[in-house]
Image (cartoon, helix red, strand yellow):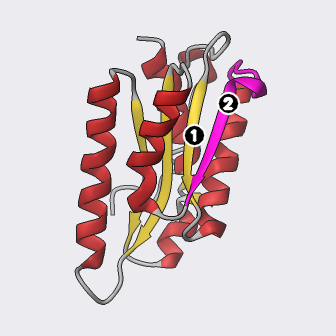
Amino acid sequence: MSSELKNLSSYNKDEVPSGERCSFGIVVSDWNDKITNALLKGAIETLIENGTDEKDIDILHVPGAFELPFGASELFRKKKLDAIICLGCIIQGETRHFEFIADAVANGIMQVGLKAEIPVIFGVLTTDNLEQAKERSGGRVGNKGVEAAITALKMADL
């Protein structure tokens, strides 16, 4: 596993553009909410730490990961945003359902970004088990929410 010995959420603040005068949307799945709430917390804290005013962060909750693309589309339609972060957690089960959902969500998020012509960031965990999800939502390998926020800041700066 490539991330086994790294904390992927460590970053050099000097290399991250300021989020001052930027507005961000965050769409978060309520499925696996202990994981997704940790991702959300990491994303919000990172945006604020890098200059984004809390009032310039719009959050939309959706039932599950499959609904993330529609939620992102709705945020784009209703708000003028510099980037949208999609946060979710899909954990492998005993059936192929995982594959269908993960593929649909990834493609849907990409399509929203292309159509909206703004960055729509994929902050969705696709893990084999709950332990891996915990490790990536504030555990020993960091917080994907932090990484998604850094990506959003960098892409909004383009």
In terms of secondary structure, where does tag 2 sit? Answer: strand
Specify start and end residues of the magenta stretch as a single range.
Answer: 50-62
What's the amino acid at mark 1? Ile
The quadrant holding residue 122 is top left
Q: Quadrant of the C terminus?
A: top left
In terms of secondary structure, where does tag 1 sit? Answer: strand
Q: Position of residue 95 (x, y in %)?
A: 26, 86
Q: Give whichever of discs 1 and 2 has the lower sequence position.
A: 1
In the displayed structure, 42 sits above or below 3; it is: above
From the viewer's side, name the closer residue of 103 and 48: 103
The quadrant holding residue 33 is bottom right
User: Within 10 Å of the Cα at label 2, are there few (<14), some (14-19), or many (20+) other Cα atoms?
Assistant: some
In the displayed structure, 9 sits above or below 131; it is: above
Q: Is residue 125 visible?
A: no
Q: Position of residue 8 (x, y in %)?
A: 50, 46
In percent of the image, x 67 and y 12: which residue is there?
20
In percent of the image, x 33 and y 21: which residue is there?
117
In percent of the image, x 54 and y 45: which residue is there?
27
- The residue tagged 1 is 26
45 left or right of 32? right
In the displayed structure, 18 sits above or below 91; it is: above
- The residue tagged 2 is 57
User: Within 10 Å of the Cα at label 1, are there few (<14), some (14-19), or many (20+) other Cα atoms?
Assistant: many
Q: Quadrant of the N terminus?
A: bottom left
**Residue sitting at the far right:** 54
Q: Is residue 98 visible?
A: yes
What's the amino acid at mark 2? Ile
Mark 1 and mark 2 residues within 8 Å of each other at the beta carbon: yes
Q: Does the segment drawn in magenta span residue 54?
A: yes
